[in-house]
Amino acid sequence: MPELPEVETVRRGLEQLVVGRRIATFEIWEPKSFQVAEGGWADSVGRYLEGARVVAARRRAKVLILDLDTDYSLVGHLKMTGQMVVRGAENWAGGHPNDSFLAQLPDRSTRLAFGFDDGSQLFFNDQRKFGWIRLMPTAAVESLPFIAKLGPEPFNPADFPEFRRRIDHHQRTIIKAALLNQEIVAGIGNIYADETLWAARVNPSRPVSEVSARKLRELFTAAGQVMQLSIDLGGSTDRNYVDAEGNRGNYLSFAHVFRREGQPCDRCGTTIVKIRVAGRGTHFCPRCQRR
C-alpha cells in the first residue's frame, strides 16, 4: 500500500502533465474500477467528464483528487498495485513499478483511460483490481465518510490542537497505534510512525496517557518533518512505488530505525531492535526510546 509521500509524488506528476488539459474521450475496461456518485454511468460521463477540463490535482491523505471545470471531481485510490501513466508528447508514470510502465497501452492491467484534447492519454492500470476512481460532485468530496473522518495531516503546526483533541479521546491506546489511526492523524503509515517515534524519543509501546503534552507536540512536528523529507527524496516504498519520473524513492536509505534492526542507532550507538506493537513490525532504539 502506498504511504502519503508516494501518493504526493504521483499527485505532483499529475499536476505537471494533466492539469489544464480537456478530457476528449473516456474508455473503461474494468467496470468495478470506475464508480459514479449519482445517475447512470453514461449520463454522468456524458455530462460531467467528457469535455471537462482538469483544473487541479489534489490529495487528502492517500486519496488523489482531480477537480474538473464541471464542478465534478475524479477521486481515486491506487491501493496496492495502481498506476497512473501518461502517454503523449511527454511520457510519465507513477505508482507500482511493473512492466506496464514501459508496455504499449492499454494492456491486460489497464482499467480506465482518459484521452485529452492534445492527443495525450492518462491510463489507470491496476493488476489486482483493488484500486478505484469515482466521479462525483466536487462539493461532496469532503463529505465522503472515509474522508470526513480523517484527522489533520501533520504538516501545519496550526493543526496541532485538532490532533491533540482527537488523541485525547484515546488515552488507553498505545501511542504507535494512535499514530497509525487515520482518524487521529492522517497519512502516517508504519514506516513514518517508527521514524516519528524515534525522532521524538518516545517508546512505541507507551500508552497515550503516559505521553506528555510537550511530547505530543514533538511527535506531531516530527511526523510532518519526517514525511516532508520523504516527499523531497521521492518517497520511501522502494519495493513497490516510484516517483513521478519513474525513479524509486530513496528515503529508506536515510531512515534512522525502519529496517535497521541489528544496526547501531544513529544517535547513541545502541543496537536497533524490531518487535511487534499494535500488530505491526516496529523498529526502535531501546536506549533513546526507553519506557
Image (cartoon, grey):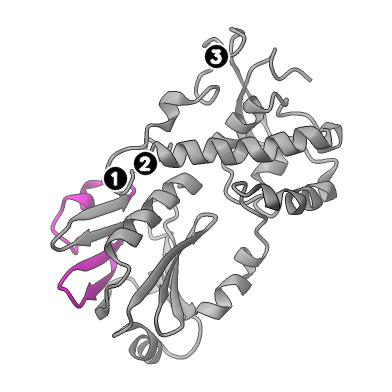
Residue at the image point whose x is 65% and y is 54% from the top: 152
Where residue 186 appears, x then y in whole percent?
A: 62, 51
The residue mark sitting in front, 2 or 3, is 3
Q: Which mark is residue 97?
A: 1
Asked whether the beta carbons under mark 2 and mark 1 sit within 8 Å of each other, the answer is yes
Q: How many marks?
A: 3
Residue at the image point whose x is 81% and y is 33% from the top: 211
**Residue flagged by tag 3: what amino acid is it?**
Asp
Residue 224 drawn above or below residue 51: above
Crowd band around label 3 with a 10 angstrom C-alpha radius: few (<14), some (14–19), many (20+): few
Task: Provide the residue span drawn in magenta.
Answer: 95-124
**Residue flagged by tag 2: what amino acid is it?**
Asn
Q: Which mark is residue 266?
A: 3
Residue 65 drawn above or below residue 269: below
* Residue 278 is at least partly visible in this image: no
Q: In which quadrant will I find the C terminus?
A: top right
Q: Which mark is residue 240?
A: 2
Q: Which mark is residue 234?
A: none
